[in-house]
Amino acid sequence: MTRDAIILAAIAGAGLLTVLLFAAGADGAPRAIAALLFLLIGPGLACVRLLRLDDPLTELALAVAVSLALETIVATALLATGSWSAGAALAALVAITLAAVAAGFARARGAGSPRA
Amino acid sequence: MAAGVPGPARESAGQAVSSSPGPAALAMAWPVGRAPSWLLTLAPLLAALALWLAAIPAIDPDQMTDLGLIAVLPPAFYLALGLLILGFCALLGRERAGDWEPGAYIAAWIVILHGTPAIVYGSLRYAWAWKHVGIVDYIQRTGGIDPAIGYLPIYHNWPGFFGAAALLTEAAGLADALPLATWSPPFFELLFAAALLLVLRAVTGDRRLAWLGVWFFTLTNWVGQDYFSPQAITYALYLAAIGLCLWAFPARMPLAASPVGRVVIRGALLRRLAADFDRRAEWAGAASSALPDLSTVQRRGLLAMTLALLASIAVSHQLTPIVTILALFALVLLGQCRAWGLPLVMLLFTAGWMATGASSFAAEGIREVLSTLGRANENIDSNLIDASLFTPGFRIVSNAARALTAGVGLLATLGWLRRFHDGYLDLPLTLLWLAPVALLGMSSYGGEILFRVYFFALPAMAFFLAALFAPRSWRRGAASLIVVALASVVLAAGFLVAYYGHERSNYFRPGEIAAADYLARNAPAGSLIVEGSPNYPSRYHRYEQFVYVPLVAWPRGNVEASANAYSLADIEQMMADRHYAAAYLIITESQKVEMSVPGLASLEAIQGEIEASGDFAVLFRNDAATIYGLAGRQGAEP
């Protein structure tokens, strides 16, 4: 497994774990840690990794900023349409993340051509 | 680098020569054996963290004076900061210093300065942060927002931040957003630093200069817009978006060819000036060798991310979108960003949101919106009040804030001039510095806009501060690094006074929180809550179910409309009103602290009158707060 694949798998795992703990109504630190770690960095990192910027600090800054932006947009869309539900918002973000992770895996398998 | 550059170019590469005193130099002199170099580099940092952790138990917030937190910080705390300054400056002298080491120092600085209140207070600091928690609570309880709500509607019209916070709170299984809010200042400051690095690395290839800019930013960002708030998150997203524009979509258009230049630059003199500016801008641009060679796919991806950042800014705050639009237009019109559609898109996002999501609020007019932006930090408010009314400590704090603001502006100007003298024109940063200044003409609310302008101009000013103090050659820069260290000490001292100076009224004791919890638990919907002032933990739970009447509004009236009902008869009449399900009067220590400025009505006196009248029953009392009901009134009893 390459480093890239490990990162992608970890993001997907954190997202799924967050959803599982949320759905199970789990209490306590494990749920809080999983959810905050995932939501503060996961969706953005999944998207940023697709671009292969080869610059860890830039990737990190963008990952957090884009994660917050995606959460803001998803939450606002639900609030503005009167259909707010934390579960739905979380599901949407995990879906976005998994789609980006899948695209990342597909690209890694498709070619070793990092710079299209 | 073009030949014939008048000033010596800053070096971003060269031989590994350390000319500064510091851990690396010491390592050569001391018999440290085979200790790894990263350990030596980080030794001052680790020592600083150890000192800080040792200092924390000695900090007693109950002993704060009118100088705020600095009155109770032990010497070990200052020693920790001193070690960080020395270690960071020594790091700058090292040729091989990578990115993680200066990043670690800046992160440690932020954690120490902004994590200390979170740890020491054991509760959320700053009254407005509690009120923002209340909006998240509203979403959690009711499952939505109400843009037409009577009280604090602005947050329901720009709900982006609160929605995201509600998502985080619910996903994490937290009862409320208080834990998130408590740790917001260090989190947002770290994010500001990371996003600013993106901006600065796009405009200079000298990594050490970029890090020094971030360092000065963290040392001078005293305005306190880092608490749990829409302005904090949108500021970080603004910096990230601008960073992406300059990093992924840079343009180096000659001034005469830029949209503005084509209109403005006519005549021989202007052409000659523009040509000179172009040469300087080109030199500065040539120094930004860090710009990546991005593929089309990468650029498209980064453009999509920029759009996401801009959209989330538009739905979360009122002032930040305006600054973003100004900055983007400036960059595009002067040929510094080639994504020319971005300012138009941002304008569309902003207008689109005002016409839809925020329509019930925007209907009152943009001017109205602007005038309500003044949910200012305590720091800002109180620094604009006539200083002659202040206690001595208050006056020191106020003057430190003014001096720091003016000093940073002056030093940044000198830094800009030094760069110009050296042959550089940093056009993108100059534009980012000037763009927020346009706000001055857009609103006249008090003098507060000055501090908002400072906040938005600070990223660029911090770079020019770095440019002023950085050596022209890092290899021969030992003396300059000593100057950097001294400047850091002075700026940090100003920061500590300006940022920590008002902490006595930002800190809430456990007793106050217990009293606030009593109201949140027991007051029936439709209750009247008369309060000494809004400066206490309030409106964080079921806020829309109560009517709040502050007895003494802060004199500029930037908080809710206050009845200013000083007289006992007025208070009794209000509380006897049967329209309310129940009526409470709450007076707390931090309200008194806020109102203790001479010249303002003293809550002590009002409370004395209340106690002496015999018309009020004490419903709740502890060492930090008292809640009264009107004696004999039904519904006031718990």
Image (tube, helix red, strand yellow):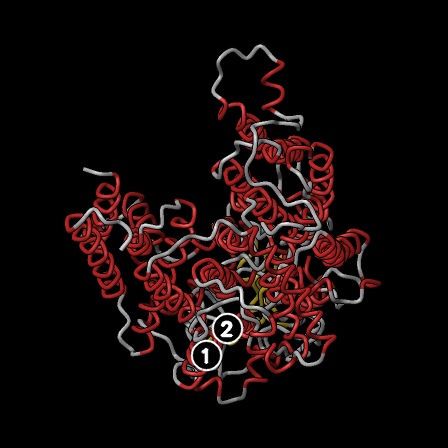
Q: Of residues B51 and A71, which is closer to you in this image?
A: A71
Please identify, in this view, whether the residue under mark 1 or under mark 2 is nearer the observer.
Answer: 1
Between B354 and B62, the residue placed more toward the observer is B354
Residue B284 is left or right of residue B181, and the answer is: right
At label 2, counting other C-alpha atoms closer than 10 Å, the crowd grade (few under 14, some 14-19, many 20 or more) is many
Determine which residue is flagged by label 2.
Answer: B321
Same subunit: marks 1 and 2: yes
Label 1, label 2: how far apart the Cα atoms are = 12 Å
| Position in image of residue B420 (x %, y %) | 71, 57
Say if residue B634 shows up in the picture.
Answer: no
Q: Split into 4 quadrants, where in the image is the C terminus of chain B?
A: bottom left
Residue A2, by quadrant, is: top left
* CA neighbours of label 1 inside 10 A, class few (<14), some (14 to 19), many (20+): few
Instruction: Name the chain letter of the residue that bears numbered label 1.
Output: B
Q: Residue B80, labelled with which disc?
A: none
Q: Earlier in the sequence, mark 1 or mark 2?
A: 2
Kind of residue at disc 2: Pro
The secondary element bearing badge 1 is classed as helix
Q: Is residue B383 visible?
A: yes
Q: Nearer the viewer, residue B365 or B607?
A: B365
Mark 1 — residue? B344
* Residue at point 23%, 49% (across, down): A113
The residue lying toward the viewer, choosing from A74 and B77, is A74
Quarter of image, res A86: bottom left
Say how many tags the image has.
2
Q: Quadrant of residue B449?
A: bottom right
